[in-house]
Amino acid sequence: MANRKSILPARGPGAFAVRMAMAGAVGLLAGVGSQIFGAMPGLLGLGLTLLTTGVAMGLAMLICVQWWRGIDEAAQEAHKWAWWWGGCSGMAVGATLLLTALVREQERIDDFSANELLAIGMFLMMTCMIIGYGVAWAAWWGKRQ
């Protein structure tokens, strides 16, 4: 396999800043596209929204692949370990909270639309997974210092 050259810096704060700026631009693309095309009725609006967000996610994956190739093996192992243990633990906590909320749905379900409930549930699950990931990542590095 040929060694691929990247125009982006491989490591360090500059590499991080460039990739964060690129990720922000991709997020902006997805957000603006979703707002513009999401307001369009019918299949055309749905298709254009799907295309815009799909392209944004593809670009985000390319940014992640470039970043992943630039970090060393120890950093890769820390992220893999944190993804598995932290993400799974966070998902278990989030699922417990969501299942508990489902059992109690009669108490406040009328205050939210179905879309709001879905968004709240997704946000809650994602938040628990990110917190779990961060704790596991710190624990991995803490054990090795």
Image: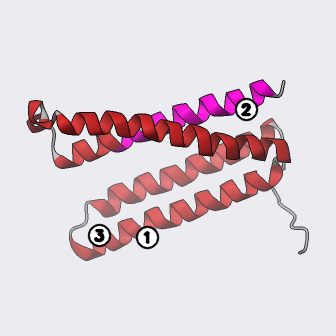
Among the two numbered marks 2 and 3 on one chain, the one whose residue lies closer to the N terminus = 3
Residue at left 60%, top 62%?
Answer: 59
Q: Which residue is mark 3?
A: 45
In the rendered view, does 41 fall on the left or right side of 86?
left
Whole-percent x and y of residue 93? 42, 34
Viewer-side residue, 68 vs 59: 68
**Number of marks present in the image shown:** 3
CA distance for labels 2 and 1: 38 Å
Residue at left 90%, top 74%?
Answer: 2
In which quarter of the view is residue 84 placed? top right
Labelled disc at residue 105: none
Q: Amino acid at mark 2?
A: Trp
The magenta stretch is 122-143
CA distance for labels 1 and 3: 10 Å
Q: Amino acid at mark 3?
A: Gly
In which quarter of the view is residue 32 placed? bottom left
Among the two numbered marks 1 and 3 on one chain, the one whose residue lies closer to the N terminus = 3
Answer whether residue 126 is magenta in the image: yes
Helix, strand or loop at mark 2: helix
Q: Which residue is mark 1?
A: 51
Q: Which residue is mark 2?
A: 140
